Amino acid sequence: MNKPVTDVSVRLPGPPVADPAPWRRLIAHIGRGSSEREHQRILPFEALDLLREARFGALRLAKEDGGAGASFRELYALALELAAADANVAHIFRNHFTVAEQFTRIPTDARAREWQQQVRDGALFGLASTEANASPAGGGVPTDTVLSPDGDGFRLDGVKYYSTGTLFADAMLVRAGTRDGRVASVIIPTKREGLEVVDDWDGAGQRLTGSGTTRFHSVRVEADEAIFDTPDRGYGLAYSNTQAQLFLTTVVAGIVRGVLEDAIALVTRRKRSFYYAPTPNPVDDPFLQQTIGQIASHAFAAEAIVLAAADALDRVSRARDRNEPADALAADAARAAAQAKIVVDELSLRAGTLLFEAGGASATERSVNLDRHWRNARTIAAHNPASYKAQAIGALLVKGTPLPSKGFF
């Protein structure tokens, strides 16, 4: 495993575009060990500690609040670079930015200001929302995780599946229901008594994201640690989940760039080819050059699509920060994020397959771990089926049916 080196120190120099060099040094350092970590199943604690120290998770906080004041475009551009270096590490931050955006960037009370301080100091937030028995997925009141009154606060009991990042987090958000049908976001420290995080994720990809089970055994929740859904706050806000969905697509776009980097390295170091190849030297082979060109085009398109969708999110953010009407802008951003997913998912899977055209049979050896790109992209793409997104967009355009406004959009 890599040892920390002195030239990777970053302390929020400003928005990423102001001085990207320190961030790129840090990301390059993290990337050097990514394949070995996944192949040997070495959890990325060191990489996350470096990003905590750099306060990567505070990029969206305003400068006056100790952050970088980064736009969504700037954040996703940097997250894409991180995903190219290590898709697992980048994916872990998806839930952090969801929590930080909804509950800490513009704090509404003393407790939220405490959470903002934690983000400013480098704390990492996880999330536990999905329930294996929920039907339908992503909608309704959570039934496996229940928030019950307990004196001047609550007790939390239940179980969550797919708690990405929580294994590494300092605090976490839990979606819970009450006996009378209300839904709340509960934000609590991960070390609180009765909270159990299990590293039992068994997916083909995302193997180091800590996307396993979290159990709650009568966990104490203070009154101001539970935020009940309202139409204008948190998950009650229409299209509140769009930035989280686009972050996933950003990770997938980063995977495409990672595929490109590995494909170039493969062709550059290849020493032999088939006896009937057009040239004896692989770097001179026009078909291998064509493959690299195709992957490079996929990477370019994926990044451009993600950043265009990020621009739509920035328009929503600016309007809401000014207390201006943003419902139509939010719907537009949700559509942009959905369209981005449909295309970028496909580009990533094609790129992951083309990688083996550049390397040949030896590229399939488990020791080189090149299949991680396809596995990670395929696993992320499976979260929210592109077919449903495409149908919803088609219904919007043909019939004027609004996109779903809650989870997954």
Image (cartoon, grey):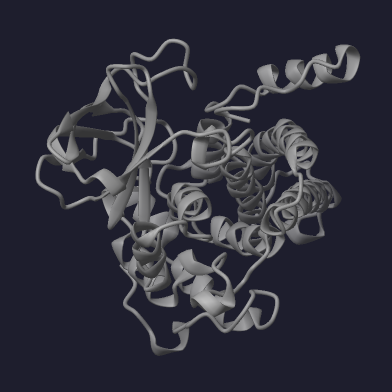
Residue at image point 55% right, 28% down = 407
Viewer-nearest residue: 9 or 283: 9
Which residue, as the protein is rendered here, is positioned at the far front? 152
Residue 307 seen in render = no
Q: Quadrant of residue 260?
A: bottom right
* Residue 311 x %, y %: 78, 54
> Vertical placement of 295 versus 144: above or below?
below
Q: Depth check: give the residue in front, 124 or 354.
A: 124
Looking at the image, residue 72 sits to the left or right of residue 91; the answer is right
Left or right of residue 203: residue 75 = right
Vertical arrangement, residue 140 with respect to residue 366, above or below: above
Q: Is residue 349 left or right of residue 122?
A: right
Q: Nearer the viewer, residue 82 or 218?
A: 218
Of 19 and 30, which appears nearest the observer?
19
Q: Which quadrant holds residue 276?
A: top right
Q: Is residue 312 above or below residue 199?
A: below
Is residue 1 at all visible to an observer of this figure?
yes
Left or right of 12? Residue 227 is left
Q: At 73% across and 49% down in the image, what residue appears?
A: 316
The N terminus - image quarter: bottom left
Where, quadrant-wise, is the C terminus in this rendering? top right
Residue drawn at (65%, 44%) of the image: 355
Q: Is residue 339 above or below residue 95?
A: above
Residue 330: percent from left, percent from top? 73, 40
Instruction: Give residue 272's position: percent from left, percent from top.
Output: 65, 54
Residue 183: percent from left, percent from top: 39, 27
Q: Residue furthest bottom?
A: 6
Seen at 45% across and 47% down, the residue is: 95
Q: How many marks?
A: 0
